[in-house]
Amino acid sequence: MSERSRGFLRDNALGLSFGGLFLVTLVGQALSGAADFNAQQVSNSLEPVTLLEYVTSSSFGVDVMENWQSEYLQFFLYIFATVWLVQRGSTESKKPGEEGTESDEKQRVGRHAQGDSPEWARAGGWRTALFSRSLGLLMGGLFLLTWIASAVAGWAAYNSEQLGEREDPVSLLGYLGEADFWNRSFQNWQSEMLAVGSMAVFSVYLRQRGSPESKPVGVAHAETGQTG
Amino acid sequence: MQRRPVPTTALLLGSAVLLLTGCSSAQRADVEQVATTFADTSVDAETRCDLLLQATLDSLEKEESAPCSDAIAQLPIDGGDVQSMQVWGRDAQVRLSGDTLFLTETHAGWRVAAAACHAQRDAPYECEVEP
């Protein structure tokens, strides 16, 4: 049975809060990024740029996209890894022995769908197959799109720097072989993998009362998958 | 004759690439005009000096111990036809048949940041004129 709605704001407080925080921090990145860019401009005897010029530049574009692609990669890998891999005692894991895509009955698909199940969970065929993988597919798709965007913006920003340093620009293929591209990718990926791994392990032994990301305070360390 | 509309996807992708790379065809026309005018030794010295980035002009006058309008005539700058042009954001490189120039965009338009540049193997270009 669906929970009773308590109004749009309360029912969507988590998404709205983080959406707001995202906008605030994006503006913060734009302002601080512009200040940093202009400090470099001045030290290179060049004119500072306006905020609008900066946020429409490849420099800002690559700084935003390189972060987005790593976040979506993190969620893409996390969603798929947690189907097949377990961490005993973690809130981020299924119970050992439950690895895999689980039964139709447990997943409430096809003839096991209930009255309030999404329509495509009941439909069967390609619709159910697609809907069953839609979260991972979306995250994977967004990762690819933002990684491509990061590569294109990074290529432009790199070539602008090359010209500023009196060096020849490179082709897109050339840029994909440059240390700049892979440094940007790996520096973002390492932090995402660290965050997920940390959460999977810390949630075994530590608690945050009231959070669904934590087990209830009194639940045993060895208990897997329970949330508070 | 019925015109075929440009596919929306192509338009969106093209716009995204332009936005991400910060380049446009209008920029290329401006860059070419500034580069060819500067490199044309038949153009009056004052006009050519106005096309220099301020920091580059200051550096030229300091090195030559003379005003730009006198010093610029002594520079080993050969013009010629545009062989290739690369514009990336606020920076550009123009290869002429007789010279290579590096330009940068200012609020007054594109300006020559470095001229009389020669490629060095595995190193930045060496330029006779730069900030």
Image (cartoon, rainbow, N blue to C red):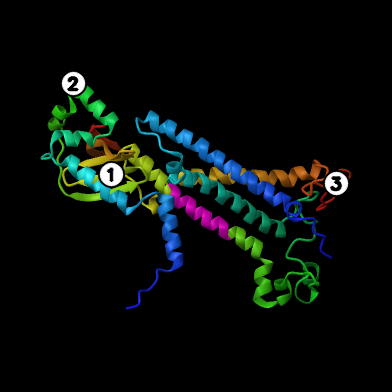
* Residue type, mark 2 in image: Ser
* Residue linked to disc 2: B65
Magenta residue check for B108 = no
Alpha carbon separation for disc pair 2 and 1: 28 Å
Along the line of sight, which residue is nearer the eye, B62 or A74? B62
| Mark toward the viewer: 3 or 2 | 2
Q: Is residue B77 among the parts visible in the rendering?
A: yes
* Residue linked to disc 1: B93
Label 3 CA crowd tier, 10 Å (few <14, some 14–19, many 20+): some
Same-chain check, marks 2 and 1:
yes
- Tell me the subunit letter for badge 2: B
Above or below: residue A106 compared with residue A64: below
* Mark 3 element type: loop
Give the magenta part as a residue range: A141-154
B117 on left or right of B11:
left
* Mark 2 element type: loop
Where is residue A225? Give x, y as percent.
80, 53
A34 on left or right of A81:
left
Same-chain check, marks 3 and 1:
no
Above or below: residue A29 compared with residue A99: above
Above or below: residue A2 compared with residue A179: below
Question: Do the residues under discs 3 and 2 have CB atoms within 8 angstroms?
Answer: no
- Tell me the subunit letter for badge 3: A
